[in-house]
Image (tube, grey):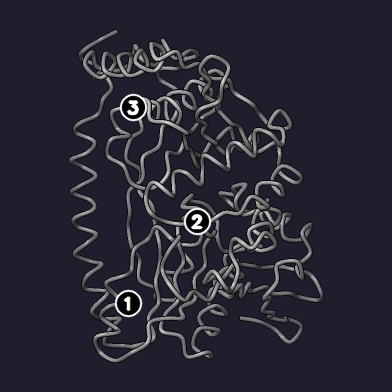
């Protein structure tokens, strides 16, 4: 419980929080990621990417004891469910059909970034529960329909269970280095796969090479302003192709270049010296983990997407000794490239008792389906079995 010297604060501007104190707290967590760094989250706000006019009103919660930060979370008042990757549109529709307002809701998440990791930053388990209780009280005090905690880690899940929040499961596809069968080259990696899977990958890579396309990798400061300009142009084209608007402004990437350059690697496709596509991954050199983020191209070339988004990043990770490559949200097709199903988690609190019971029933049935789905996916592993040998 909070004591007499404890202070709870709500921030509508991340700049009002001490970046050093935030990052020091993040470093203490079980699963920190670059996306929870103050620089990343503050850049989303300062660049106009995650702001009130876009449906993301910051309501960051911090807990202080004797003037020191001991718990914090990035929370937002949301007027829609875009950019979250945990879908609750049906819940919003049910509220509307019953004459109730689902929005605004309170969301604890990294905007536009479905990367699992620590969300409730706290000095210990007790403080983590206090933080989540403060978030719930904030939602109740403002008569919000609900509060949601997305892509959290196990420590956060314990806090959610303690307060009776409803758990929800999801699936992503990640490549993880196999200590029992270490590889140091892409050729070694392909040799661990079943023949038909290996052959398909080789054919896809050959199509790109035969089209005269070559790739270069650029890490950290090697990504100059010209490359960032080209990347953002391609990024916008990807959204245009899907008849939607991009979430991230060009200014956001300027801020990343200035404050977090060491956390980015860009793969640029060229033909006859002309740039025609690129992909961007985030990296954490401390944990040796990489995260697939964005891509785009100026013209269609068969299999260019697979090369830019999977094969080039995987090859880079293997050659640089990285332990994990997360492929992002959704996509069974990623399994054929060696990214295997991994569970993700979210937790939810709904103010309306009847809707809470209905959602709980839905989530229980959904969880059984997710578990069966994951089991079925694992039965179709692209890798050789032990019986198949080398």
Quadrant including the C terminus: top left
Q: Relative to residue 390, is residue 184 drawn left or right?
A: right
Instruction: Point out residue 167 in the picture as x, y percentages from the top left corner.
Output: 35, 65
Q: Residue at x 56, y 41 (%)?
A: 233
Disc nearer the start of the sequence (3/1): 1
Mark closer to the chain start, 2 or 1: 1
Q: Residue furthest top?
A: 390
Position of 101 with respect to 8 (left or right) is: left
Q: Residue at x 63, y 72 (%)?
A: 60
Residue at disc 3, secondary structure: helix
Which of pointers 3 and 2 lies earlier in the amino acid sequence? 2
Q: Position of residue 357 (x, y in %)?
A: 26, 81
Is disc 2 surrounded by few (<14), some (14 to 19) or many (20+) residues within 10 Å? some
> Which residue, given by chain and number where applicable, does mark 2 sit on?
112
Q: Helix, strand, or loop for circle 2? A: loop
**Residue at the location (27% across, 75% down)?**
359
Residues at marks 3 and 1, CA–CA distance in whole angstroms: 36 Å
Question: In the rendered view of the protein, which quadrant contains the N terminus?
Answer: bottom right
* Residue position marked by numbered label 3 in the rendering: 337
Is residue 325 depicted above or below 162 in this figure?
A: above
Whole-percent x and y of residue 102? 38, 82
Q: Nearer the viewer, residue 280 or 285?
A: 280
Residue ID for mark 1: 92
């Amino acid at each position: 419980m909070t004591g007499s010297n404890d202070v709870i604060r709500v921030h509508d501007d991340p700049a009002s929080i001490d970046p050093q104190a935030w990052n020091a707290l993040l470093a203490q967590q079980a699963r920190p990621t670059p996306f929870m760094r103050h620089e990343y989250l503050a850049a989303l706000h300062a660049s106009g990417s995650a702001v009130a006019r876009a449906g993301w009103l910051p309501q960051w919660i911090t807990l202080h004891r004797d003037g020191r930060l001991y718990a914090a979370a990035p929370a937002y008042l949301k007027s829609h469910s875009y950019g979250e990757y945990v879908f609750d549109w049906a819940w919003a529709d049910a509220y509307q059909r019953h004459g109730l307002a689902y929005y605004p809701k309170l969301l604890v998440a990294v905007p536009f970034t479905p990367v699992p990791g620590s969300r409730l930053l706290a000095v210990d388990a007790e403080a983590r529960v206090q933080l989540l209780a403060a978030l719930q009280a904030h939602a109740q005090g403002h008569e919000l329909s609900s509060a949601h905690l997305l892509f959290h880690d196990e420590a956060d899940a314990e806090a959610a269970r303690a307060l009776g929040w409803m758990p929800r499961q999801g699936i992503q596809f990640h490549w993880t280095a196999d200590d029992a069968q270490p590889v140091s080259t892409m050729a070694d990696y392909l040799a661990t796969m079943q023949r038909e899977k290996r052959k398909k990958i080789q054919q896809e890579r050959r199509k790109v090479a035969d089209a005269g396309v070559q790739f270069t990798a650029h890490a950290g400061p090697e990504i100059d302003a010209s490359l960032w300009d080209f990347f953002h142009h391609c990024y916008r084209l990807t959204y245009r192709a899907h008849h939607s608007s991009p979430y991230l402004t060009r200014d956001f990437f300027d801020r990343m270049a200035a404050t977090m350059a060491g956390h980015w690697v860009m793969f640029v496709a060229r033909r006859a010296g002309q740039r025609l596509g690129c992909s961007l991954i985030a990296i954490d050199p401390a944990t040796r983990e990489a995260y697939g983020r964005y891509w785009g191209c100026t013209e269609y070339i068969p299999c260019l997407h697979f090369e830019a988004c999977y094969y080039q990043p995987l090859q880079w990770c293997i050659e640089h000794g990285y332990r994990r490559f997360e492929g992002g949200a959704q996509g069974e097709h990623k399994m054929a490239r060696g990214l295997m199903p991994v569970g993700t988690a979210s937790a939810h609190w709904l103010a309306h008792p009847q809707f809470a019971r209905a959602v709980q029933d839905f989530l229980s049935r959904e969880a059984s389906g997710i578990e069966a789905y994951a089991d079925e996916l694992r039965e179709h592993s692209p890798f050789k079995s032990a019986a198949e040998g080398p």
